[in-house]
Amino acid sequence: QKEVEQNSGPLSVPEGAIASLNCTYSDRGSQSFFWYRQYSGKSPELIMSIYSNGDKEDGRFTAQLNKASQYVSLLIRDSQPSDSATYLCAVNILFSSGGSYIPTFGRGTSLIVHP
Amino acid sequence: GAVVSQHPSWVICKSGTSVKIECRSLDFQATTMFWYRQFPKQSLMLMATSNEGSKATYEQGVEKDKFLINHASLTLSTLTVTSAHPEDSSFYICSARDISDDYEQYFGPGTRLTVT
């Protein structure tokens, strides 16, 4: 079973702090990784994609990928109450039976940013 | 860009009836669309992968005769919940993958189905 693991949380941080969200995956051959934000009752929204080892920054968000450790993380700087949501890690896993990449999601981490 | 729409956004139907949900990619072509179901406070569950012009691939445990998927064009996929029962009440979300990008997928706003 190819899996994506996340701590369900909730992760509670004060406003202005850095929130660190983590994700591990089991398929060593995975090449593409994504972070989505999902507000309650809404569908997921793509925040970041990352394909290469290292860091990728976009505004207050930084995605970090370490393929050797099979680990991807998301840092949110200067956290705001509006960042309170569930953050989903997704990994495209190659299914040999169909030859296509199928997105596999973690269960999500609930983030609470309190004023 | 990369907008995916779903229709309807919510629907209430009686037990035993069928409901069709449409998923459209508005500004890009999508060879692959995915259908998910999400129960309250639970994670996304992939139901099936829909490829334009071919039969959908269903995940284990998802009844293909109950959840009919049609992907007749590069911009439209439909999910029909047949003979709906109250346990089918859920949040159904589609996503689409741009034909020019084999990696990223974009989600529709979801359809909330309530079966009474």
Image: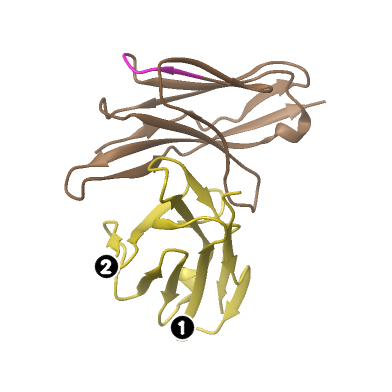
* Residue A20 x/y as whole percent: 58, 19
Left or right: B67, with A15 as reference point = left
* Residue A105 x/y as whole percent: 42, 40
Q: Residue furthest right?
A: A115
Q: Is residue B6 above or below residue A19?
A: below
Numbered range of the magenta stretch: A64-68
Chain B painted colour: yellow
Q: Main secondary structure of the magenta part?
A: strand
Q: Which residue is mark 1?
A: B18
> Closer to the camera, A2 or A45?
A45
> Closer to the camera, A86 or B70?
B70
Q: Is residue B99 above or below residue B9?
A: above
| Mark 2 residue element | loop
Which numbered dot is residue B113?
A: none
Q: Residues within 10 Å of mark 2 (few under 14, many from 20)?
A: some
Q: Residue at x 31, y 14 (%)?
A: A68
Q: Which residue is mark 2?
A: B55
